[in-house]
Image: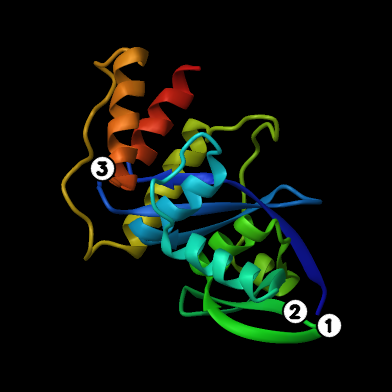
Amino acid sequence: MSLVKLTIKGISYSQTQNGAYALILNEVDGERKLPIVIGAFEAQSIAIALEKDITPPRPLTHDLFKNFADRFEIVVKQVIIHKLVDGVFYSSIICERDKIEEIIDARTSDAIALALRFKAPIFTYKNILDKAGIYLKTSTSKKTLSKKEEAVIENLILGEDKESVKPSREDYSKFSLSELNKMLDAAVKDENYEKAASLRDEISKRE
């Protein structure tokens, strides 16, 4: 089976339900996107790895794993999303130490959080992308999701995570950029990374 390289487009959150997120992966040589529903903690960890200007005062779990691996000269070479069963994605982390390669099973969200920290490529098999990929005609230069993309992902999130959702998230539209940046600094200091990620999203929309 042929492998397809993926890049991270971003993380989408439900506009109406808190605690519900989807990681959006792009097909490198195509127009399909692979949305994967993930938990809030993993969404925070991936968002922090993507946003270089958010630095946790203490290492998160995935940062700790990276530090541990660096100390013992373990390198993550690549991540492969290798299976899709009943809507659940399964992934493998390909590691190397002393020129010996090992394959470790992992949740896809954890695997991608580590891939970002090791700057490792992410792949899936063509048959998985054929089955779960979606076509959304938007500009590849855009950093944020279009309204159409948001609507499609919203339906995906609600369909996958109806039981665990919480009340709607806070509205930051009434705050100025200066206020938002102060709130972001405070959220990072308090290690409230879910709030920090939300604030960073709002700031990015205005910049």
Q: Is residue 148 left or right of residue 164?
A: right
- Which residue is denoted by mark 1 in the rendering? 99
Please determine whether, in this image, residue 39 is positioned above or below residue 139: below
At label 1, which amino acid type do we have?
Answer: Lys
Label 1, secondary structure: give it. Answer: loop
Q: Nearer the viewer, residue 189 or 133?
A: 189
Please determine whether, in this image, residue 188 is positioned above or below residue 89: above
Q: Where residue 174 sits in the image (x, y, percent)?
A: 24, 16
Cβ atoms at labels 1 and 3 below 8 Å apart: no
Quadrant of res 199: top left
What number is the disc on residue 190? 3
Residue at the spot x=22%, y=65% of the render?
163
Quadrant location, the N terminus: bottom right
At label 3, which amino acid type do we have?
Answer: Asp
Q: Is residue 175 left or right of residue 82?
A: left
Please determine whether, in this image, residue 77 is positioned above or below residue 139: below
Q: Nearer the viewer, residue 2 or 112?
A: 112
Label 2 to label 1: alpha-carbon separation: 6 Å
Label 3, secondary structure: give it. Answer: loop
Cβ atoms at labels 2 and 1 below 8 Å apart: yes
Q: Where residue 119 sits in the image (x, y, percent)?
A: 70, 56
Q: Where residue 19 sits in the image (x, y, percent)?
A: 28, 53
Label 1 to label 3: alpha-carbon separation: 41 Å
Please determine whether, in this image, residue 46 is positioned above or below residue 150: below
Quadrant of res 121: bottom right
- Which residue is denoted by mark 2 in the rendering? 96
Q: Where residue 132 sits in the image (x, y, percent)?
A: 58, 65
Label 2, secondary structure: give it. Answer: strand
Residue at the spot x=68%, y=31% of the render?
139
The residue carrying pointer 3 sits among few (fewer than 14), some (14 to 19) or many (20 or more) residues within 10 Å by Cα, namely few
Residue at the spot x=81%, y=51% of the render?
29
